[in-house]
């Protein structure tokens, strides 16, 4: 955009500002649907490419440009979700959604405030995103569009390619999945205290204290993407996890763990010489850690790494 004092080389598209203002909404939608900021940005770029591929007359005929952009982005995401299973099968090890930092932790060089990319709220919590991964593509799109972004089922139907009634059923099924797998979350302050207790016990190598802060059925999942070492399969059980954690900390000399916000909730970030090597998200239920997700794949840690390319 230009101001009145800036020179203008040629005509300015009066609709450009309105069209580009939809970018934040599109990024927010695509990230929740795909669990990857990089893929979300690709979707938005493709959506705008399709918009400007139309003739000016066709663009002017679009009654609601924002609605058009959302429909196109939603359909692109639906197609990507349809092929996600095959991509997950090729992925080395466990796949975890890409973790996002709080705006104060957004790495230098990213160029944009993360608030302009993804709004951090409960609908981007790691536990929520993992539940979304268990849904069919149509369920996920219908649920996110209707329950998170408040689109009507008639609007959802245009994107999913089903009747409004069918979309209502899809969203209802997805809602049941969410309720069944996500008990009421603890208040943020309580979550932070539990994560802090975990960190202190871990650094002290205190297996008993670790077991005390872990749910008996705790599960740890790690994502190295085949690039760095990580647990090949989820690890379950408080004692097993506690003993593994203590053994691991002994092998990671020089790694400093910091309490940070991960996807809007209390988490830990492991850094070596100021470079982020692991980001950990937690699911805290009844003041105990029920699930831990540790992302080590460097490709998913770009927003956390200072000096990374924008």
Image (spheres, grey):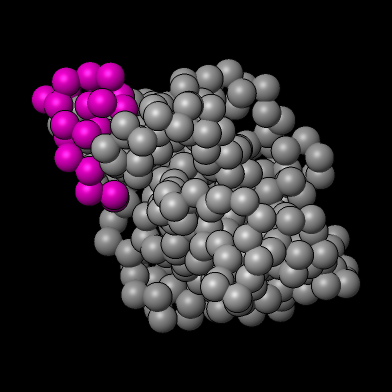
Closer-to-camera residue (161/189):
161
Q: Is any part of residue 278 visible from this angle?
A: no
The structure residue drawn at horizontal position 46% and vertical position 56%, both measured from the top left corner, is 17
Where's residue 111, x and y in %?
Answer: 69, 64
As for residue 163 lying within the magenta part, the answer is yes
What segment carries the magenta color? 148-166
Q: Is residue 294 above or below residue 273?
A: above
Q: Is residue 302 left or right of residue 214?
A: right
| Residue drawn at x 48%, y 77% as measured from the top left | 192
Task: Pick whichever, 299 or 56, lies toward us.
Answer: 56
Position of residue 209 measured from the top left corner of the image (x, y, whole percent):
57, 74
Answer with the quarter of the image where residue 274 lies: bottom right
The answer to which of 309 and 300 lies nearer the viewer is: 309
Q: 207 above or below 133?
A: below
Residue shown at 31%/32% (left/top)? Answer: 61
Q: Position of residue 152 (x, y in %)?
A: 17, 40
Q: Main secondary structure of the magenta part?
A: helix
At x 62%, y 51%, the residue is 10
Total number of numbered discs in the rendering: 0
């Amino acid at each position: 955009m230009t101001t009145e004092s800036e020179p203008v080389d040629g005509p300015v598209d009066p609709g450009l500002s309105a069209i580009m203002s939809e970018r934040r909404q599109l990024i927010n939608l695509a990230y929740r649907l795909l669990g990857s900021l990089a893929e979300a940005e690709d979707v938005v770029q493709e959506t705008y490419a399709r918009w400007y591929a139309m003739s000016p007359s066709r663009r002017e005929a679009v009654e609601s440009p924002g609605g058009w952009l959302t429909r196109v982005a939603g359909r692109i995401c639906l197609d990507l979700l349809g092929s996600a299973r095959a991509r997950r099968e090729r992925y080395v090890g466990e796949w975890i959604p890409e973790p996002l930092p709080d705006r104060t932790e957004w790495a230098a060089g990213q160029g944009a405030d993360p608030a302009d990319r993804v709004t951090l709220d409960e609908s981007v919590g790691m536990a929520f995103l993992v539940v979304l991964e268990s849904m069919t593509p149509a369920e996920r799109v219908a649920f996110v569009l209707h329950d998170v972004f408040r689109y009507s089922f008639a609007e959802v139907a245009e994107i999913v390619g089903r009747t409004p009634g069918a979309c209502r059923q899809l969203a209802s099924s997805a809602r049941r999945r969410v309720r069944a797998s996500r008990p009421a979350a603890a208040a943020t302050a309580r979550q932070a205290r539990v994560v802090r207790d975990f960190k202190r016990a871990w650094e002290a190598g205190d297996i008993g204290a670790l077991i005390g802060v872990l749910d008996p059925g705790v599960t740890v999942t790690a994502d190295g993407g085949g690039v760095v070492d990580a647990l090949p399969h989820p690890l379950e059980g408080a004692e097993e996890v506690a003993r593994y954690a203590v053994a691991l900390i002994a092998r990671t000399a020089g790694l400093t763990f910091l309490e940070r916000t991960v996807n809007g909730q209390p988490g830990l970030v492991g850094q070596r010489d100021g470079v982020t090597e692991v980001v950990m998200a937690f699911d805290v239920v009844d003041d105990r850690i029920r699930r831990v997700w540790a992302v080590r794949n460097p490709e998913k840690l770009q927003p956390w790494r200072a000096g990374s390319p924008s």
